Amino acid sequence: MKIKANKQNNCYGRSLPQSEIDLLANAMQYDKPVNGLTHNFYRYPARFSPQFAAAAIEIFTKQGDLVLDPFMGGGTTIVEARSRGRLSIGTDINELALFVCRAKTTIITTSDAIDILNWGSNIEDIFKLNQLSGLISVENNDYYLRHLSCKDTWRIRKMLDIGLEALPRLKNNRQKLLIQCALLATGQWALDCRITIPTATEFRQQLHKKLIHIVESAVEYSRLVRKQDRIIKCTLPRRSLCIKQSATNIHKNKMILKYPKPRLILTSPPYPGVHVLYHRWQIQGRRETPAPYWISQSEDGTGGSYYTFGDRKQIGLSDYFKIAAKSFNSIRQLCSKNTIIVQLVAFPDIDWQLPNYLKMMEEAGFKQYKSTASSDTNRHIITREVPNRKWYAAQKGNTPSSKELLLIHYPR
């Protein structure tokens, strides 16, 4: 997607050109499966499309500007910003999100690519079910391996364990991270939302395909980033950060404070009252397992409400709005007068939740942009149907929470 950036880099005031809103709206409606660069390394829940992220970055920033995503999830914003010559910072409290984003933004060499592909060519020899293996040490194994030891799933668990045990034999952390990500993605393919579990042979074949895809994507991403790095002049030690950090006190992070003020905050925060399994796979129905944390060697915060600002069943969602307010108050302290905040949010009960959300943003120090074509701020609250929903969400049909809203704000 080629979009002409707005060259006026001063504060937009209180309105946005309708042409820019239209560009964002068109990109937002893109409903094809996520693809391109490293975006398909792992299917992280509740992703927005790279096309939407690319449009927002091209419209509102120029090369060398900082793009921040304080709820980065699978890292779509960070990948698009980095590959387009922007500085980028992504934060999240979910260690699985950190693992995935770091894998997606790993810059590899030709030697790395060759070594990973050579490793993949030996999958038949490495992954033999009759060999001994001890489960890779993680704290509370019983918790992380829940539902992986039954007659249908034990082979997949054994394959994953063999793969994890083989990682130390690789040459460097870049190679280990990408192969570990391939194991994670193949485990998701084999187990998540599936009734019929694949055979060991099918697992090996899929892992080999995934490794080839990851290497090819990482090579292309690395090529683009190196090309952009030759253009940008930056004295910072790293052009992008993916760090574990709660948004409630993000303004206190010393690493982030070394960077310039963000020109664009592009994010999709937790949705009020919406149930999203950021921390589980569902095996053969609704049997949940936190196995992704075992494979990524990460720690689960435990409990869906840990990742969603509070229990979705709480009347009035007071915890949600309290934590959201604290988060955006902290985010506000990182902003300059020229910062633009673009976010996608969904609401199960839009009639009362959207007004409360907009009030929360106002109290946190943000004003909503209006279109130059209208004095009505709601003129550009654009919606889209969330594509590629999980089966258990799609079963419910087009509920209010299946629609995402585009909100654009600026600091007061």
Image (cartoon, helix red, strand yellow):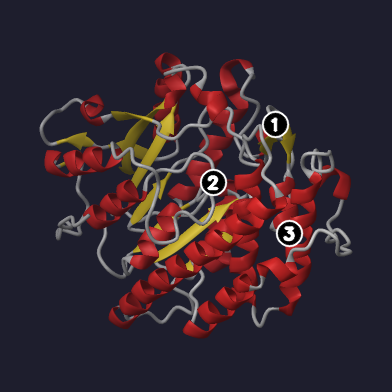
Q: Nearer the viewer, mark 1 or mark 3?
A: 1
Image spot of residue 342 (x, y percent): 34, 44
Residue 334: image quadrant is bottom left
- 318 or 56: nearer the eye? 56
Q: Amino acid at mark 1?
A: Gln
Q: Amino acid at mark 2?
A: Tyr
Q: Secondary structure at mark 2?
A: loop
Image spot of residue 114 (x, y percent): 53, 81
Q: Total marks drawn? A: 3
Image spot of residue 183 (x, y percent): 65, 58
For the residues labelled 1 and 2, the Cα–Cα distance comes to: 19 Å
Q: Secondary structure at mark 3?
A: loop
Residue 244: image quadrant is bottom right
Q: Secondary structure at mark 1?
A: loop
Compared across the picture, whether 219 is left or right of 125 comes to left
Which residue lies under the disc numbered 2?
44
Which residue lies under the disc numbered 3?
297
Upstream in the sequence, badge 3 or badge 2? Answer: 2
Which residue lies under the disc numbered 1?
284
Residue at 48%, 71% (x, y): give it: 258
